[in-house]
Amino acid sequence: EADPSTVITAIGIAAETPELREREVVSNSKWIDLVTATIAADSVDPFAARVVGAAAMGMISTVVAEWFRLYPDANMHQLLDDGFDILSAGLGAFFADHG
């Protein structure tokens, strides 16, 4: 795993700077829109697609925060794998019921 010191510093600064937090919210919203459009293109209900997009971005934000909190004892790749596994289990059940 690469030296995360730059990312850790950036996360700390962003967390303490309102303007940077605002930019993060806008960026996350754009990612949600992108994920939503990609999922909706597969004829998934637009609301369900938006919920999935928001869930994915929420998971990624949570993974980054958890990695930051636990560093150096956490592995970013493993946290992402675990996060996607958790989402997959829940979303898989939803889409099995709602086709």
Image (cartoon, rainbow, N blue to C red):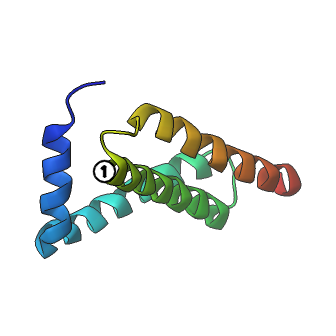
Q: Position of residue 42 (x, y in %)?
A: 66, 44
Residue at the extreme top: 1
Q: Residue at x 20, y 55 (%)?
A: 11
Q: At label 1, which amino acid type do we have?
A: Phe
In which quadrant of the rendered view does residue 82 lie? top right
**Towards the viewer: 33 or 86:** 86
Please indicate whether residue 73 sits to the left or right of residue 53 in the image: left
Q: Is residue 78 above or below residue 63?
A: above
- Which quadrant, please, contains the N terminus? top left
Residue at the extreme bottom: 18
Q: Is residue 56 above or below residue 19?
A: above
Q: Position of residue 77 (x, y in %)?
A: 44, 32
**Towards the viewer: 36 or 15:** 15
Q: Residue at x 37, y 39 (%)?
A: 73
**Towards the viewer: 10 or 73:** 73
**Towards the viewer: 53 or 21:** 21
Residue at the extreme right: 97
Q: Is residue 41 above or below residue 23?
A: above
Q: Residue at x 43, y 50 (%)?
A: 63
Please indicate whether residue 49 sits to the left or right of residue 22 in the image: right
Q: Position of residue 8 (x, y in %)?
A: 20, 47
In which quadrant of the rendered view does residue 48 lie? bottom right
Dot 1 corresponds to which residue?
68
Graded by Cα atoms within 10 Å as few (under 14), some (14 to 19) or many (20 or more), the crowding at tag 1 reads some
